[in-house]
Amino acid sequence: MKPGLHIVQGPPASGKTRLALAWALEVLGRRGRVFWVGLPHQRAYVYRLLSEEGAFLGLEFLSFQALYYRVLAEAGWLKPLLPGAGRVALVGEALRRAGEGPVAPGEARLFARAIAELKRYGISPFALPKEGEAGRLRRVYRLYERLKAGSLDYDDFRHRALKAPLRLFPWPDLVVVDGFREVGPLDLRFLRRLSERVPVLLTLEVLPEGCAPHRVLEARPVARRVFRLANPVEEARYLLRALKRALAPKALGGEGLAPEDVLVVAPPERIGGLMLLKDEYGLPLEDGRERALAETEEGERVLALLNPFPTGRDLLALGFSALGRKALRLGLAGEEALRALAEREGLEAEWEAFLRLRTPGPDLEAWAEAALEALGVEAKEVFLSRFRMALRVDRGEPLAWWRSLLLDEVLPPEVGRGVAVLPPLRATGVRARRAYVLEWVAGRYTLGEREDYFLLEDLREQGLLKGLPRRLRGLDPLFLEELSTRGEEVVLLYPEAGPGGPVEPLVPGVRPQALPPASRLEALPQAPFRPAHPTSPASPPHAEVLRRYLECPFRAYLERYPLRDGEGSPWRALPSPVDLGALGGLFADGRVGPWLRAHGAHLQGLRLYVLWPGRRYRLRLDGVRWEGRAVHLYRLLGEGAEPDLSPKRRWTEWLALKALLQREDVEAVYLWAWPWLGRPRPVGKGVYRKGDALPALKEVEPLLEKALRSWGAFPPRPGPHCHACGLADLCRKEEE
């Protein structure tokens, strides 16, 4: 086999990996050495394929990064590595030095991704325009390279490997590059350079411009079955029964497949549910999702410490159990509410201990180390290194950055010997005898192609940026073909309807034949259990829960608990209290900046989402601003939303208005409704003074008393509101 670059092109499931394996086995059979370059998650798959052919020594699996590291190490060109979280932190420092004002981690992450793409395609900052958002990227990119000094990020490995002497020892007899949809120009240049010394087999689905294939493979037939199930629950249950039957021995009526012969592809948000059910079905499922460092057991404790709005769950995670249980039962969150609870329950000592633990001292690094020690974190250096990065970005307020960098640090999943349950991107490049794919519906599996924030499509075809690929390339059909060919036999499943209503399948399917029970609960059904309606002696969280209680008690009960994610308010982008001087980054935004400048008088000092505790109920005020003896009370809304403060739709502001006017230090209360990016508008009279009539209260107070008298039982109450309720799948209104 002579040196040279041999490119094999073929669609998914055309046999590219099997061809590469045959080349590798020929070399290994004569005691040669093979470098197999692929995606990290392919390692176990490649070694399994090799083991099926017998015991062979001499094959080493490497990622591109590991190969470049090897080249630089042999040449003596290595420098300290800057990990992904370190890149984000350094970009944050570059933004700050560029005069961008306070820098949010999300903004730094956006710039870091853009810089990584430019470096991956060999584009220097000087190739970028000097104006507009691209000009901002140019300045930050230059500063980032300057601040990086003697360190190397992952993309620097690629650049330096193109220039470093090739002194690999021992030299491979064959290099296989497999599992990639396409390769970038710098990777291709390195492979051409390597191929001058050694044969390089490169398999691709999309051919680089100007490259001719050594061989073209045709797609091979794949046995596909498409099944439709009534809903996601039935879909998941069918999958688990099918897996149990596939893995069961033939003597017991199963198919006798080994766990590694089967894989499951599912949207990331569906994998957690499958893992919860694996014990019920006795299935060896392996979670194939990557996890952030913050999602480890130790990371969760550190995140609980860093939560700027602590909850009862955070207190429990940190060992403050008495206060944590009470806060969790009452649904309390935030330092103000937790402090009040501690004072009321005589738990001040526990609260003070919590504050001491989470409050940084003058020596920030010593505080962080002591806090990690107190939390029982064994891998302290990993967490401390991210804290040092956070200090470099923002020494005044490092905790938000520390939290973000821990969430950025991704850990690969542990490789087991069970059935791999993979998110879509981790399923590329691996195959099995049989693959099951969940939710085979339109729009579910996509590469998310969209224009870049900094460099639009037309800009990528100009001047020195011509080497940068377009973002809108229409690769989704190829991606779907990849996912639907992950097995010699593929079973595509989809629900006829989900929480949002009917769905559109990518390929219409048929109802599958019913499978026998596969879990103890299914095989041994008990007498139907009908639980009583829930009850609770706890006081209601706040007045709006009481208002919703009168509409439907059951819904009010369920919405007290985090059974579904709520939509985040855009107002939470602002700090509380609002300090206009600390919003430099937001002022630069083309929409938010002019709005901030226009309404600075209302925004400065505005406190957001203030909890007002009471003996019988509580109020959560959207926005409060004091102006001497006058109070400005704001109902904060989403962009373009119309205010509705009628007694049937809102109680909080009317109850707060009455309570404020009863205080001696308040002479007037101004009532406003304020949509995001809109202007504040007076509500009712606009300004209310002592002695003014409050007609809305004549409706609100009787309803409030009625709700308080009834609170404690939570039967469903069907009505027109059912149509807008997102909890229909949990409701038991048919029992009424």
Image: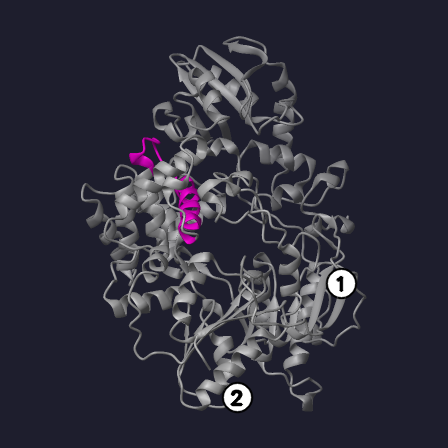
The residue that label 2 is drawn on is 53
Decide if residue 224 is on the left or right side of residue 616.
Answer: right
Q: Where residue 80 appears, x then y in whole percent?
A: 25, 58
Q: Where residue 151 appears, x then y in whole percent?
A: 26, 54
| Magenta highlight: main SS | helix
The residue that label 1 is drawn on is 229
Asked if residue 103 lies in the magenta stretch, the reply is yes
Decide if residue 693 is on the left or right side of residue 510.
Answer: left
Q: Amino acid at mark 1?
A: Leu
Between 344 and 285, the residue placed more toward the observer is 285
Q: Residue at x 19, y 49 (%)?
A: 366
Between 470 and 713, the residue placed more toward the observer is 470
Indicate whether 357 appears above or below 552.
Answer: below
| CA neighbours of label 2 inside 10 A, class few (<14), some (14 to 19), many (20+) | few
Name the secondary structure under disc 2: loop
Q: Where residue 70 appears, x then y in whole percent?
A: 32, 69
Asked whether the viewer can see residue 452, the reply is no
Decide if residue 541 is on the left or right side of residue 646.
Answer: left
Numbered range of the magenta stretch? 95-120
Asked whether the viewer can see residue 628, the reply is yes
